[in-house]
Image (cartoon, helix red, strand yellow):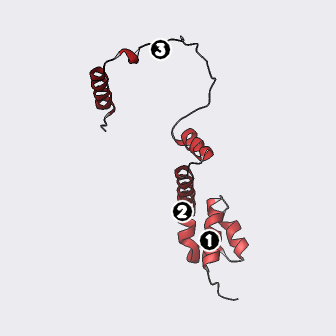
Amino acid sequence: MTQHLPTDELRHMVEVLVAGGTPNRTIAKALDIGMNTLRRHYSNELDHGLATANAKVVRRLFRLIEQGSTPATIFWLKARAGWKEGQVVEVAQKAEPAYNFSALTDAERVELRAKLEAVMGRTH
C-alpha cells in the first residue's frame, strides 16, 4: 500500500466537497483513501471547509456589490437586509407642490438648508 500524500489541489477539492455537503465517507472514496487517512491529512478542510467557502463567496459578493452589480446588491438586500418584493401601489399626487420653495428669500433658504443638514447629520 502506498502512502497518501496530500497536495494543495487535493486539499482544495476536499474543502469544496465539504462545502457542498458531501459526506466524509464519499470524500474518502473519491480520494481512494480510508476514513482514518482522510481525518489525519484533511482535518482542517473537514472542520473548516464550509466556513472557508462561505467566506470566499461573501467576499466575492461584496466585490460585486462594490463594483456596482445590481443583481448582487438586490440579492444581498433580500437575503440579509430583509427586503421583499411586493405589490406596487401607485398613488395619485396633486400637480402642485405641497410647499412653494421658490417663494423663500435667500436668507430663508440658507436657514432651511442649515436645519436640514443638522437633522441629517452633515454639513458642507
Q: Which of the marked residues, 3 or 2, is nearer the chain's N terminus? A: 2
Residue 104 in picture, x, y percent from top left: 34, 17
CB-based contact (under 8 Å), mark 1 and mark 3: no
Instruction: Work out how far the residue at label 3 is from the one at label 2, CA to CA, in angstroms.
Output: 54 Å
Element type at mark 2: helix
Location of residue 19 by image quarter: bottom right
Where does the N terminus fall, quadrant-wise? Answer: bottom right
Element type at mark 1: helix
Q: Residue furthest bottom?
A: 2
Question: Is 37 rendered above or below residue 20?
Answer: below
Q: Amino acid at mark 3?
A: Pro
Judging depth in this view, the residue of 52 and 111 nearest the camera is 111
Q: Residues within 10 Å of mark 2 (few under 14, many from 20)?
A: some
Residue holding disc 3? 97
Residue 69 in picture, x, y percent from top left: 59, 48
Q: Residue at x 60, y 67 (%)?
A: 15
Location of residue 123 by image quarter: top left
Residue holding disc 2? 52
Q: Which of the marked residues, 1 or 3, is nearer the chain's N terminus? A: 1
Q: Residue at x 62, y 80 (%)?
A: 7
Q: Amino acid at mark 1?
A: His
